[in-house]
Amino acid sequence: MSKGIIVVDMPERCNQCKFWFAKATVPIEYRCMGLQKEITEKNLTEEKPDWCPIKEAPIKLE
Ligand code: SF4
């Protein structure tokens, strides 16, 4: 299958991103919609995970 691109501002942590959500569970579970994986509170508030699918664009995009 070929690959596609969505252009977004580069987040430093997940709570700056449009692709995180919180599941209504106890305890609450945070997830990345991009890869359908769990993210931690540290990912949410301090730094995104290493496996984040958002990569720096090789050229400047507007
Ligand atoms: S892992 Fe990356 S794409 Fe997923 S919610 Fe965090 S910043 Fe967004």
Image (cartoon, grey):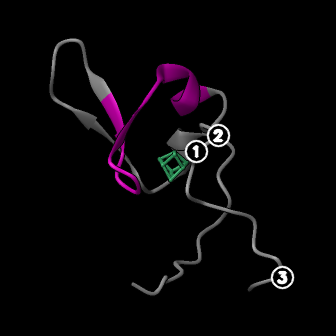
Residue holding disc 3: 60
Q: Which mark is residue 59?
A: none
Mark 3 or mark 2, whichever is nearer to me: 2
Foreground pick, 16 / 7: 7
Locate residue 18: give its quadrant. Answer: bottom left
Q: Position of residue 9 (x, y in %)?
A: 65, 65
Callout 2 amino acid: Asp
The magenta stretch is: 30-45
Q: Is mark 2 within 8 Å of ligand 1?
A: no
SS for dot 1:
loop
Q: Are marks 3 and 1 in contact (CB under 8 Å)?
A: no
Taking the spot 84% from the left edge, 83% from the top edge, the residue there is 59
Query: Is residue 30 rendered to the left or right of residue 3?
Result: left
Callout 1 amino acid: Trp
Q: Position of residue 62 (x, y in %)?
A: 74, 86
Locate residue 43: give its quadrant. Answer: top right
Q: Earlier in the sequence, mark 3 or mark 2?
A: 2
Q: Is mark 1 within 8 Å of ligand 1?
A: yes
Q: Are marks 2 and 1 in contact (CB under 8 Å)?
A: yes
Residues at marks 3 and 1, CA–CA distance in whole angstroms: 23 Å
Mark 3 or mark 1, whichever is nearer to me: 1
Taking the spot 64% from the left edge, 40% from the top edge, the residue there is 50
Residue holding disc 1: 51
Taking the spot 57% from the left edge, 49% from the top edge, the residue there is 52
Q: Which mark is residue 50?
A: 2
The quarter of the image holding the N terminus is bottom left
